Amino acid sequence: MNFKTVIILLISFSIFAQETDKIGGYLFAHMTNDDYGTLHYSISKDGLHWNSLRNGKRILEDYKGHPDIITGHDGKFYLVGNPKDGGNKIRIWTSTDLLNWAFLTDLKPDMSRLPEFDSKDYWHGAPKMFYDIDTKKYIITWHFATKNRNKVSADEYWGSMRTLFVTSTNLKEISMPKRLFDKDFATIDVIVRKFNNSYYALLKDERAPSQDWPTGKSIRIAKATNLEGPYSEPSPSISPNFREAPTLIPQGNGKGYYLYFEQYPGIQYEMAIATNIEGPWYDGYANSFSLPKEARHGCMLPLTEEQFEKLNSTFGDSNDFKNQSKWLYVGFKDPGDRGLWFSTSEDGYVWNELNNGKPWVNPAIGMNRMRDPFITRDPRQGFHLLWTIGNQKMGYAHSDDLVHWSTPRTIPILADNPNVKNVWAPEMFYDQASKKWFIYWSSTIKGEFPETEGQVKNDKNHRIYYMTTDDFKNFSKPTVFYNPGIPVIDATILKEGDTFYMVVKDERDTPLKKNLRITTSKNILGPWTELSEPITATWTEGPSVFKKEDTYLLYFDHYNGGKGMQALESKNLKDWKDISTKVQFAAESKHGSFIKITSDEFNALKRAEF
C-alpha cells in the first residue's frame, strides 16, 4: 500500500489509560463474519496479537450494531449500537467493568429538519461515540442515506451516505442532528478524537473509486478547531481502496500508533504503523500481527493491567493468554562469539532449535562475545534481550515481535571505574510500582569485599549489582543488589504472589560449592532471607525458572562433565525433583532464559526462519 504523509489524530484515550505506561493490554470489541451485528471480545497484550474470548461466543445477547465503546464523564464504559428490533433509535448500554452490560437509554434524533434524508430508510448506520473532556459533551455520529435503497443501484445508494451527529451532556437530552461535514460527499464509519486543541474525524470515503475519485472506499482524515466543526477537506487516502471500520490504538511503548482497518467484506484486517502522529504511515508486516480470522467491524481500546486480567480470567477459557502452551528458549553455544540461538517448545520440556542451527541474533560489528542471554517480555509491548560481553559492558537489543531485532548495542557499566573486572549474566525485572526496570548482574570489583577473597580463585570475588532504567538509555548509578557474605553469580528472579524468589550460584571454590541456592524477599530490594541448602550438584550455573501451569521448572547448565542443560521441577519452590532425563535440547546449548509465547508468536517465528 502506498501511504502518504498525512496529519493524523492522537486518539483521546479513555481517562483510565491516557499515559502509555498505564497500558496493561487492549480490548477489541467486534462482530464476526458468521454473527454479524453482534458483540464479541478479543484481547491482546501488545496490540498486535489478538485472541478471542469466550470461545467466540457473544458477550451481550441483546446487542445489535457495529460495536463502539468509550469511557464517559463518570469513568463508566458506554457501548453504542441499535435496537434489535430496528427502528429509528440509537441504543446505549453502560458498564463499570466491561464484563456486565446494562441497557441505559434509547436516543431518537429528530430528523424533521433534514428532509433530504429518506424517512422510509430510517437507519442509523454504525453509530460511534466520543466524550470531549474540555466541552463536557458527547458526540454521536452515524451515517444515513439520502436515497432509497430500493430505487437506486448499490453504488448510488452507498454514494448517498452522509455522516450526521448529535451532542449531549448527559445522554438523556440530545441536540438536533446536523451534518458533520460541509462538503457534500459520501462518508461512513466516522470516529471523532482530539489531539491537543484540534479535533480529527477519521472516516471512510464511501464513494465508489474511479479515475475521477481515486480516494473512494478508503480511510481519510478531516480536521477542525471545534468539536462540531467545520471540518476541513479530508486528507489524501491513508489506506488502499475497499477498506473500512478504522480504529486506532497507541503502542504500549509510547513510540507510535497502530491503525487497524478491515478489508471487506470480511476478507482480513490490516494494520498500518506510524511512529509520529503526522506520519508517514507504513504497512504492518503481515507476520507481525494477527487477529481472529472471523473478526469484523469493531473498536479497539487500551486497558489497565487490572482490566485486562479481569477480562482474561472471566472470559479467557480458551485464549492463549490463559493457557499459553508455547515457550521460547534463548541460549548460546561455546565459545560464545557467534550469536544467540532460539528454540521453541510446545510442552516446556522438548526444545526444537529454530533457523536450521544458525543463530537468530548475530553479533554487531566489533562485538566479540554474546553469552548468558536473558529475554523478557515488556508488559507494555515488545521484548528485551540482555547478554554477557565480559568487560565493563553488557549487550542489549529489543524487538516488537521476536522476529526482528534491533542492532545489538552495548550498555556501559561503571565505565569510569578501572577496578571493575567483569559484567556477567545480566537479567532484569520490571517493577510495576515504580514503572522501572531493575537490571542486575554479577561483577567483581577489585578491593571490594576483601574478607571473602580467599574463597575464590582467579580473583573473581563476585557480588550482584543493579541499576534502574525506564528507557534503556538513561540509567541510575550501579550499586550492590545482593551480598550474602559469600561470592555469588547468575542471579535470576521470579515473583509469585507477594514474594520474590531469587536463585543464585554459590561461586565458592574454597570450600568447593559451585551450586545453586535460593533466597526470598517481600521487596525487590530486600532484605533477603538466608540462602537455602544447595538444590543442585557442584559445577552448575545459569539458572532460569518459570511456571508451567501449577509446576515450576528450573533449568540450569551442568557445565563440567558434559551434561549440558539440566532441569528440576517443584510445586512449591522449596522441594525440587530432578527431571533432566525428560528434557531435550539441541547439542551444545548452554546458559539461557525462557519465556511463554502465544501461538501466533510461535507460528511467526516458525514462518520467519531464514
Image: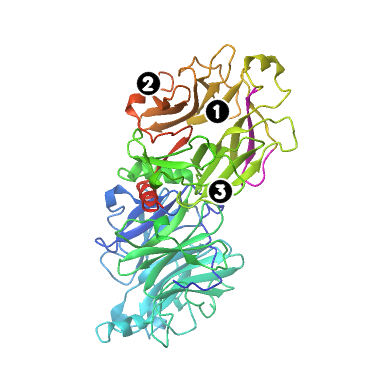
Rendered location of residue 424, percent (x, y) = 59, 32
Residue 90 visible from this viewpoint: yes
User: Disc 1 on helix, strand or loop?
Assistant: strand
Task: Using residue 581 as the reference point, say whether residue 130 is left or right of it.
Answer: right
> Are the residues at dot 2 and dot 1 in contact (C-beta closer than 8 Å)?
no
| Residue at the top extreme of this rendering | 511
User: N-terminal of the two: label 2 or label 1?
Assistant: 1
Asked if the magenta segment contains residue 470, the reply would be yes
Rendered location of residue 477, percent (x, y) = 70, 36
What is the distance, in whole Å, between disc 2 and disc 1 at their CAs?
A: 20 Å
User: N-terminal of the two: label 3 or label 1?
Assistant: 3
Tell me if mark 3 has few (under 14), some (14-19) or many (20+) residues whose alpha carbon lies within 10 angstroms of its own: some
Three-letter amino acid code of the residue under disc 2: Asp
The quarter holding residue 486 reads top right
Tell me if mark 2 has few (under 14), some (14-19) or many (20+) residues whose alpha carbon lies within 10 angstroms of its own: some
Asked if the magenta segment contains residue 417, the reply would be no
Q: Which mark is residue 578?
A: 2
* Relative depth, front residue between 455 and 224: 455
* Relative depth, front residue between 457 and 202: 457
User: Disc 2 on helix, strand or loop?
Assistant: strand
- Between disc 3 and disc 1, the foreground one is 1
* Relative depth, front residue between 395 and 501: 395
Rendered location of residue 539, percent (x, y) = 49, 20
User: N-terminal of the two: label 2 or label 3?
Assistant: 3
What is the distance, in whole Å, between disc 2 and disc 3 at their CAs?
A: 40 Å
Three-letter amino acid code of the residue under disc 1: Asp
Specify start and end residues of the magenta stretch as a single range. 460-476
Q: Which mark is residue 134?
A: none
Q: Is residue 320 above or below residue 266?
A: above
In this figure, which residue is indicated by the disc labeled 1? 490
Three-letter amino acid code of the residue under disc 3: Asp
